[in-house]
Image (tube, rainbow, N blue to C red):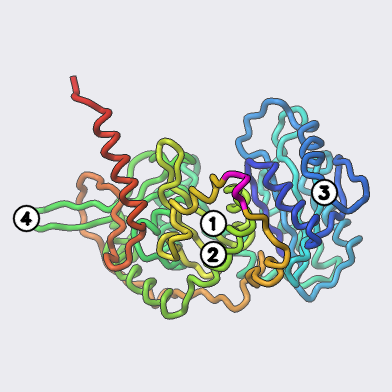
Amino acid sequence: MVAKITIGSSLFGAIKYNADKVNIGKGQLLDTNKIFNNGDGKVNVAQVLADFEKRMPRQMRTEKPVIHISLNPHPDDKLTDGELTQMAHEYMQRMGYSDQPYIIVKHEDIDRHHLHIVSVRVNEQGKRINSDFTKRRSLSIIRDFEQRYGLHHGNKREEERLYNRIPPVNPFEGDIKKQVGNTVKAVFHDCQFQTIGELRALLSLYNLTVEEIRGNVRGQDYNGLVYSVIDADGNKIGNPFKSSLFGKSVGYEALKKKAAFSKKNIKDKNLTEPTRKNLEYALRRTYDKEEFVRMLKEKGIDCVFRYTDEGRIYGATFIDHRTHCVLNGSRMGKVFSANALEQHFNTPSEEQIPFKEKEEQEEQPNTGSTSAEGLQQTTSHDEQEHYESKGGFASFLDALDILNTDNPVTDAEEEAFRHRLQRKRKKRRGPRL
């Protein structure tokens, strides 16, 4: 069995996601805790949301109060609904949520049935539920279930994918330089990306960013990379680190080699297809951005959007942890470009096309929310090229997504839109006094 824990800010999105599974016959409401359940097997989103809100403080400081848990038995583990319900309640009790409102839903839309539990991380007094050593405590409970119920032991690779085994950099504890070096090396080893822009999107998951620097030393031009720690808003924290501090394997030349290898490998093995199918399905399924992100997260895909000052999406990158690929939306097709996604998420309700259950049965990608069978890691230590970026500092440049000039990372509309915004900002600044 494998457990996956996700925290978020949209309680409505989490409830609706599970309610839709139940109400179209692709899931079952097994039980609730401190949430009214009339026993008809349906989930009334408005009623459930109201019951949650009754038990939540009016004001709270926690930005992401929602916890969304999935418990995933092995496909060969046959458990009754009663056993699954008992497991869910015990899991929540041992994690410290016995007094919290929550719903338990069994998803049946794929062969491997699994549980989803939605709750909130703040009690009625506004105090956050203890989150210390969450993954460690969760794993201990799962191991206990496996022994008591005779379940298959959770697959190590699957656990690593669900728990995102590359830890994010924490700027407030430990040796920051060591954290940055370990994280960057792991990213270069485990993942495939074709541009510095895609690398930057990937690193943002781990509280990092990267920029290219150029300079001239004694008449000789050079290129290098600089890594910086960032906060939740993307602002840099502390001093940057030259790539040469961490070795040749994460420098500018290594990035070029990695980009060339990734481009060929992704094309030869058609590694964009699993991601594309899940994106297509999610776009048919919802017009709500948060639900779209949640659905892809369930399939092991992270979304990284870039926004203008006005809040408009101008860039979209998708990171598929099953194929270990970072994929720019425009490269996969115009329908996945930033402009297309911005329009999709702002489609007026009267123009939205209802999702059809028949379409879901026929066309839903058979990838499973937690199954990585058949998808193998496509990089190894032997494939890493070791080149060292030349030393020295220069002024930081804007993001340069041109390592592969024949494979642009944004479509023409996105690039034109970005340039128009830059020109408008320059005009507004006026002369300095």
Amino acid, disc 3:
Val
Q: CA distance from mark 1 to mark 4?
A: 43 Å
Give the amino acid at mark 1: Asp
The residue at which mark 3 appears reads as 43
Decide whether the magenta segment is chiefly helix, strand or loop.
Answer: helix
Residue under label 4 = 219
Residue at (70%, 50%) from the top-left corner?
68
94 or 364: which is nearer to us?
Answer: 364
Q: Quadrant of the C terminus?
A: top left
**Of tags 1 and 3, which is closer to the observer?**
3
Callout 4 touching callout 2 (CB < 8 Å): no
Of 397 and 37, the residue lying toward us: 37
The magenta segment is 348-352
Label 3 secondary element: loop
Residue labelled with disc 1? 302
Residue 431 in the image, given as x and y percentages of width and height:
19, 24
Query: Residue 395, how many percent across, how many down?
Result: 21, 44
Above or below, 299 relative to 9:
below
* Label 4 environment density (alpha carbons within 10 Å; few <14, some 14–19, many ≥20): few
* Secondary structure of residue under mark 2: loop
Q: CA–CA distance between discs 2 and 3?
A: 31 Å
The residue positioned 58% from the left and 44% from the top of the image is: 348
Residue of label 2 = 321
Evaluate whether residue 156 shows in this view. no
Q: CA distance from mark 1 to mark 3?
A: 27 Å
Q: Earlier in the sequence, mark 4 or mark 2?
A: 4
Q: CA distance from mark 3 to mark 4?
A: 70 Å
